[in-house]
Amino acid sequence: MGQVFTFNQMQKEQMRTMLFILRYLKLSFLTQIIYMYRSSSILVQITEGDAYLAHLAVYPVFRSKGYGAMLLDKIEREAGEARCKRIVLDVETCNERAIEFYQRLGYRIESKSPVLRIKDHEFQFFKMSKNIETV
């Protein structure tokens, strides 16, 4: 499964996400806001003409059978049909398997995020992208 958002769709999705969070977290949202702010300044940094890939996953039993590559190929074609110029994604720097998968399919590391600390956990991400104008 996977989700791709164009620049305009991403702006709408961010608003829906914020309303969802406010609706269900109510006042506990206030205790989490600092972490949400930090993550939003690090992740999902896209510009006009980009498609953002979120939540691409293949169940472990189906991995290494080509399904992920087939999904990504379809996603890239659909993003190209939507006139996107490239696909952008964020992947944790410790997720070596995913990084190798994306690199094998032509994605390149663009940048490395600062460390995001949430309570006693640290997260760091690579921003990866692939030009799809010719796909």
Image (cartoon, rainbow, N blue to C red):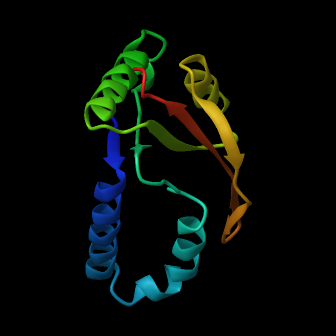
Quadrant of the rendered image containing residue 106: top right
Residue 77 can be seen in this image: yes
Whether 120 is drawn above or below 134: the answer is below
Q: Residue at x 43, y 9 (%)?
A: 65
Horizontal and vertical percent position of residue 25 = 34, 79
Q: Is residue 85 left or right of residue 79?
A: right
Q: Residue at x 26, y 69 (%)?
A: 16
Q: In the rendered view of the protein, which quadrant contains the C terminus?
A: top left
Horizontal and vertical percent position of residue 36 = 52, 73
Whether 99 is drawn above or below 36: the answer is above
Q: Residue at x 69, y 53 (%)?
A: 124
Residue 95 can be seen in this image: no
Quadrant of the rendered image containing residue 24: bottom left
Horizontal and vertical percent position of residue 21 = 33, 75
Q: Is residue 24 left or right of residue 47?
A: left
Whether 66 is drawn above or below 121: the answer is above
